[in-house]
């Protein structure tokens, strides 16, 4: 820390050799600090445990069964959509085929087995 004094000849700067005191934390202070840091984590964990939501994603087992169809040479998803659900919008049926069968694209290969969405199956 330094001080500035005004003299008749001008400014002079006086230096002090005082160093800032070192912070010392006691054992009790460490315990309190640790509790303050751990409290939000404990609250978050307890709230998530009592939230009622399942903790594991994908833990439910599906027992649904689907009818399957095999793709013939020269057929596309649009052809299958028109055949499976002639009265429905083919765009929606194709989207359901892609979603249900986890397809990356709308292209299908001859002989490929596809599950028919339940809302369009004949049962």
Image: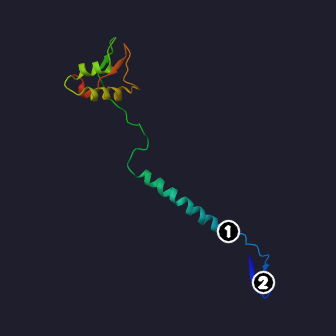
**Apparent side of residue 55 relative to residue 37 in the rendered image (left or right):** left
Residue 82 x %, y %? 24, 21
Relative to 86, is 51 above or below?
below
Q: Nearer the viewer, residue 79 or 47?
A: 79
Q: How is the image coloured?
A: rainbow
Of the image marks 1 and 2, the number of the one nearer the N terminus:
2
Residue 49 visible, this orientation = yes
- Asked whether 23 or 35 is in front, the reply is 23
Image point (32%, 21%), residue name? 77
Residue at x 27% of width, y 22% of height: 81
Q: Residues within 10 Å of mark 2 (few under 14, many from 20)?
A: few
Check the image and name the residue furthest to the bottom.
8
The residue that disc 1 covers is: 26
CA–CA distance in space, label 1 to label 2 = 47 Å
Answer few, some or many: residues within 10 Å of disc 1's Cα (few below 14, many 20 plus, some between 14 and 19).
few
**Image mark for residue 116:** none
Residue 64 in sight here: no
Residue at screen point 39% across, 51% down = 51
Left or right side of 87 for 91? right
In which quadrant of the rendered view does residue 116 lie?
top left
Identify the element where label 1 is drawn.
loop
Q: Is residue 48 above or below residue 82?
A: below
Mark 2, residue position = 10
Quadrant in the picture for the C terminus:
top left
The image quarter in which residue 12 lies: bottom right
**Lateral position of residue 76 relative to residue 4, left or right:** left
Q: Secondary structure at mark 2?
A: strand
Outermost residue toward the front? 9
> Compared with residue 39, is residue 4 higher up or lower down, i.e. above or below?
below
């Amino acid at each position: 820390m330094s001080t500035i004094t005004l003299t008749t000849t001008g400014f002079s700067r006086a230096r002090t050799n005082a160093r800032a005191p070192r912070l010392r934390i006691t054992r009790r202070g460490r315990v309190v600090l640790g509790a303050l840091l751990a409290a939000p984590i404990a609250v978050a964990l307890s709230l998530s445990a009592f939230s009622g939501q399942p903790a594991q994603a994908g833990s439910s087992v599906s027992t649904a069964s689907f009818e399957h169809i095999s793709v013939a040479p020269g057929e596309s998803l649009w052809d299958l959509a028109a055949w499976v659900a002639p009265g429905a919008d083919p765009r929606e049926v194709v989207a359901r085929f892609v979603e249900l069968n986890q397809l990356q694209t709308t292209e299908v290969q001859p002989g490929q087995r596809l599950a028919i969405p339940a809302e369009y199956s004949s049962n």
